[in-house]
Image (tube, rainbow, N blue to C red):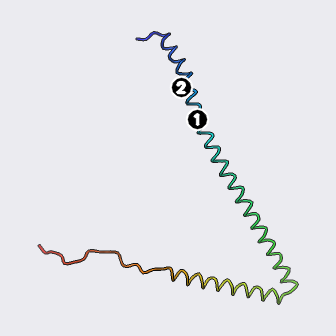
């Protein structure tokens, strides 16, 4: 049985070698996790900025349409009608493309051939 001094010396040695290595390993893992979180936060900030710009553009477009509707009602009606026609034409074209992209798929294989009677 080892004596107390030997055990104490061995524990001190382990504390100096094993604990710093484990701490360093945890720190490296923490650094990687922080880097991932920072990258995610950066992407989210960029996306939020883009969405704010899109929302600002939509508000500006809406305000302009309202002003046109008040000052030039005939022009507004013509623009609204033309926009609806363009949108409908795009929907028709999208539907045609989807129909063309559909391909024939034969039915799933099943058992075939005569069965043996016993």
**Number of disc labels:** 2
Q: Residues within 10 Å of mark 1 (few under 14, many from 20)?
A: few
The earlier-in-sequence mark between 2 and 1 is: 2
- Residue at 40% from the left image edge and 78% from the top image edge: 105
| Label disc, if present, on residue 18 of the rendered structure | 2
| Label disc, if present, on residue 26 of the rendered structure | 1
Outermost residue to the left: 118
- Residue at 82% from the left image edge and 90% from the top image edge: 74
Residue 51 pos. (x, y %) = 72, 64
Please identify the quarter of the rendering in which residue 91 is found: bottom right
The answer to whether residue 102 is above or below residue 38 is below
Residue 11 pos. (x, y %) = 52, 18
Residue 111 pos. (x, y %) = 26, 74
Please identify the quarter of the rendering in which residue 25 is found: top right
The answer to whether residue 43 is above or below residue 63 is above
Residue 90 pos. (x, y %) = 64, 83
Placement of the C terminus among the 4 image quadrants? bottom left
Label 1: which secondary element: helix
- Residue at 48% from the left image edge and 11% from the top image edge: 6
Placement of the N terminus among the 4 image quadrants? top left
Pick whichever, 77 or 85, lies toward us. 85
* Direction from residue 64 to residue 99 in the image, left or right: left
Label 2: which secondary element: helix
Disc 2 + disc 1, Cβ < 8 Å = no
| Gap between marks 2 and 1 measured at Cα | 12 Å
- Residue at 69% from the left image edge and 87% from the top image edge: 85
The answer to whether residue 28 is above or below residue 8 is below
Please identify the quarter of the rendering in which residue 16 is found: top right
């Amino acid at each position: 049985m080892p004596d107390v001094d030997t055990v104490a010396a061995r524990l001190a040695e382990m504390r100096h070698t094993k604990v710093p290595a484990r701490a360093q390993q945890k720190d490296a893992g923490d650094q990687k996790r922080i880097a991932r979180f920072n990258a995610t936060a950066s992407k989210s900030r960029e996306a939020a900025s883009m969405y704010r710009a899109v929302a600002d553009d939509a508000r500006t477009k809406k305000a302009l349409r309202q002003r046109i509707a008040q000052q030039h009602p005939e022009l507004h009606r013509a623009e609204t009608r033309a926009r609806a026609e363009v949108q409908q034409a795009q929907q028709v074209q999208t539907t045609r493309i989807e129909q063309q992209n559909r391909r024939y798929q034969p039915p799933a294989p099943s058992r075939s051939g005569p069965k043996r009677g016993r």
